[in-house]
Image (cartoon, rainbow, N blue to C red):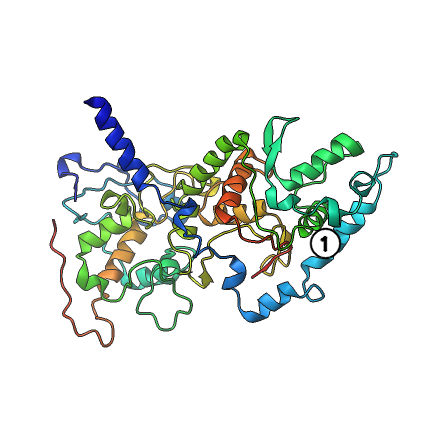
């Protein structure tokens, strides 16, 4: 009796879950690119007009430059990024077996620096880390975001979803309230996008510069009057994992351009 | 709708009288005054002095204080870029009583836990509040009364809206 009641209850709970992550139907799913006016879309699509390409070019230089101390450059092991890095950004964050935790692309780059190049990690939001990450991610441009079906990532991805839906800060808002439930509407002057991280690191006109997804998440948390997590916190990786699943299979746009 | 009885006088915090001369920074850092929910309203003012509609209007239009127009459109044609996440404030004073307005601003989640409306005068259930805002309501008691007084006066229907304003009966 109790058991059947529990089963019925479980059935009801399952039925109440939206069919898709975030409740956005595949046919409705779209990048923030689609929300922009034709001029900004054209700027993103034209590499010669896109200010983010300056960072990508710097990243290309870093890729080929060997650090002092005799260790190889990125290209010394990986060769032509065009071939070896194609598709990598589309599947990050990924599981790092050596450390037993999920990592994002910028963490991957810094781990590589430490392990194989024996140099200090690049600081979060530094031009070098943004440039190198953008250069690597640009090699996946146009490929569908394809999160790995690695069961070791599942707990962090669930945690990311819980964080996405958690009300926080003095205003008691959540990511989901705007980006799942009210995308397409206006918060003051701003059209609310679905919040898919298709093009990070990206160039934001508001920043007059390049920034990571973590920087963007911190902006939203400050807007909710919540205490942002420190850069590199596992909470961000969890959110990035959930957001990648939620965004798939939209194409990678790095470097995207946004207002 | 489940409504807490006055027996459960929602003592959101212990009372503390604010000196009339207190600055906003001082006032907003004070412990919250007690709030008595009756039905779907808070009939009693939070302050001894009456709210000031001109100050209330300034708060409603200020996107870093009242924040209202980020989500609500309203009868303010001079204000550009009003949000559209929440009901239009046009005629809200005819739709809701003063006490109903006060409860919806103080803590609308008492009526609808799913509402996206921030609770302007409650510290309940908060997570990860940034240091600058910890322990502080979004608006001070005096500001709540200013806003309530201003919104109560927004009684004109939208232009072209010929339906008579209807008072929602208390449940």
Chain containing mark 1: A
Judged left or right of residue A180, residue B15 is left
Above or below: residue B124 compared with residue A249: above
- Judged from this view, the residue extending furthest toward the bottom is B160
Residue drawn 14% across and 38% down? B5
Residue B10 in which image quadrant: top left
Q: Is residue B69 visible?
A: yes
Quick one: label 1, few (<14), some, or many (20+) residues within 10 Å? many
Residue drawn 22% across and 66% down? B91
Expressed as whole percent of the image width and height from the top left, the position of residue A199 reads: 60, 53
Residue A208 in which image quadrant: bottom right
Above or below: residue A114 compared with residue A135: above
Q: Which element is circle 1 on?
A: helix
Residue A47 in which image quadrant: bottom right
Expressed as whole percent of the image width and height from the top left, the position of residue A77 reads: 80, 38
| Towards the viewer: A213 or B57 | A213
Expressed as whole percent of the image width and height from the top left, the position of residue A60 reads: 77, 51
- Judged from this view, the residue extending furthest toward the right is A70
Residue carrying label 1: A56
């Amino acid at each position: 009796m109790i058991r059947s009641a529990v089963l019925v209850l479980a059935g009801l709970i399952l039925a109440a879950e939206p069919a898709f992550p975030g409740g956005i139907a595949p046919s409705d799913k779209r990048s923030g690119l689609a929300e922009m006016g034709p001029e900004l879309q054209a700027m993103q699509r034209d590499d010669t007009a896109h200010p983010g390409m300056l960072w990508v070019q710097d990243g290309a230089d870093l890729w080929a430059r060997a650090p002092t101390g005799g260790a190889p450059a990125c290209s010394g092991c990986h060769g032509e990024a065009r071939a070896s890095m194609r598709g990598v950004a589309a599947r990050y964050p990924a599981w790092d077996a050596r450390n037993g935790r999920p990592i994002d692309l910028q963490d991957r780059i810094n781990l590589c620096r430490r392990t194989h190049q024996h140099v200090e990690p690049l600081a979060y939001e530094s031009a070098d880390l943004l440039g190198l990450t953008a250069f690597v991610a640009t090699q996946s441009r146009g490929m569908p975001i394809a999160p790995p079906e690695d069961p070791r990532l599942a707990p962090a991805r669930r945690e990311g979803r819980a964080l996405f839906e958690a009300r926080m800060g003095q205003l008691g808002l959540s990511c989901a309230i705007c980006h799942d439930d009210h995308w397409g509407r206006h918060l003051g002057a701003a059209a609310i996008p679905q919040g898919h991280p298709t093009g990070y690191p990206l160039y934001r006109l508001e920043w007059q510069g390049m920034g990571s997804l973590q920087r963007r998440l911190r902006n939203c948390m400050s807007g909710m009057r919540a205490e942002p997590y420190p850069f590199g916190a596992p909470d961000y990786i969890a959110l990035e994992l959930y957001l990648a699943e939620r965004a798939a299979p939209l194409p990678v746009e790095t470097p995207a351009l946004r207002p | 709708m489940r409504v807490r009885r006055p027996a459960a006088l929602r003592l959101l915090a212990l009372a503390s009288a604010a000196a009339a001369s207190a600055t906003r920074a001082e006032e907003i850092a004070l412990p919250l005054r007690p709030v008595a929910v009756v039905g779907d309203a808070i009939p009693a003012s939070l302050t001894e002095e009456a709210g000031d509609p001109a100050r209330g209007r300034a708060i409603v239009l200020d996107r870093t204080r009242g924040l209202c127009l980020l989500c609500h459109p309203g009868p303010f044609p001079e204000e550009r870029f009003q949000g559209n996440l929440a009901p239009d404030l046009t005629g809200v004073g005819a739709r809701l009583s003063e006490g109903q307005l006060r409860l919806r601003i103080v803590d609308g989640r008492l009526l609808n836990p799913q509402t996206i409306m921030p609770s302007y005068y409650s510290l309940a259930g908060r997570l990860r509040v940034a240091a600058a805002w910890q322990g502080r309501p979004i608006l001070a008691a005096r500001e709540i009364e200013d806003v309530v007084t201003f919104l109560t006066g927004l009684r004109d229907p939208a232009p072209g809206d010929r339906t008579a304003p209807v008072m929602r009966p208390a449940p």
